[in-house]
Image (cartoon, rainbow, N blue to C red):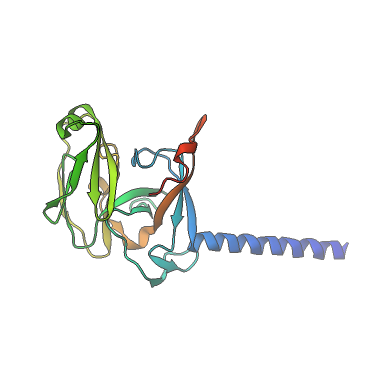
Amino acid sequence: MSLNFKKITSELGSLLGLLLLICAFKSTFVMNYTVPTGSMKPTIEPGDKLFVNKMAYALRVPFTKIRLFEYAAPQRGDVIVFECPYDPSITFVKRLIGLPGDLIEVENGFIKINDEPLKISVENQKTILEALSEGGFYRESLGEKTYTVRRVPVRLGIPSVRVRVPDGHFFAMGDNRDESSDSRSWGFVPKENIWGKAKFIYFSFEWPTFRWERIGNKL
């Protein structure tokens, strides 16, 4: 009986050790994130599962926000996964728009950074005014990234934003420009809240459909 007990406890200890190593690996190196909302449509759809590189910017102590070593800075246009600034239980995925020190202006969903408007181009021969009044899509360029922005029919009374990003913080927005809760409403993202950079979609499912065509889409 004692031999069996020792064997069982030894196997349980090995299993717990293995689970701890797996959790430490995920905490430090990579994470997967299932997207619950449409704030990043059409780039990211609800039900998309993202591969997130947690070492894109820094090496952390496992299970903490403590950064041992920083070797890269987040860049404009990156799709970042981060802890919600006002509720640690929530994880967000948004596009990084503004860096520390940037002057960000957003009016009717159009962005200026340091007094320079982002370059946009219209798809399917639709004009910008049509995209705003009827809803539609256009392409927006930021840094080395070009991505699709979704607009819904224009709504009146949307407040403009003009802010300076403080040191150690970032300004993030959703590609689904009119249906995203982001830095325009709840403020800046502290650097320590950023878990990593979303790299690609490794699986996509929205009941009852597997969306095979989205698997492997780079972000």
At 24% across and 29% down in the image, what residue appears?
135
Image: 19 above or below 172? below
- Residue 196 position in % (x across, y down): 40, 58
Q: In the image shown, does 95 or 183 lie closer to the viewer?
A: 95
Displayed quadrant of residue 214: top left
Displayed quadrant of residue 54: bottom left
Q: Is residue 121 found left or right of 209 in the rendered image?
A: left
Image: 186 above or below 13? above
Identity of the residue furthest to the left in this view: 115
Identity of the residue furthest to the bottom in this view: 69
- Residue 213 position in % (x across, y down): 46, 37
- Residue 130 position in % (x across, y down): 17, 29
Identity of the residue furthest to the front in this view: 125
Is residue 19 visible to us here?
yes
Q: Is residue 22 found left or right of 107 in the rendered image?
A: right
Q: In the image shown, does 183 or 123 lie closer to the viewer?
A: 123
At 46% across and 46% down in the image, what residue appears?
216
Q: In the image shown, does 135 or 170 lie closer to the viewer?
A: 135
Is residue 154 visible to us here?
no
Classify the position of the N terminus by image quarter: bottom right
At 58% across and 60% down in the image, what residue appears?
22
Q: Is residue 210 found left or right of 9 in the rendered image?
A: left
Identity of the residue furthest to the top in this view: 134
At 66% across and 61% down in the image, what residue appears?
16
Q: How many marks?
A: 0
Image: 157 above or below 196? above
- Residue 53 position in % (x across, y down): 44, 58
Q: In the image shown, does 176 or 19 lie closer to the viewer?
A: 176
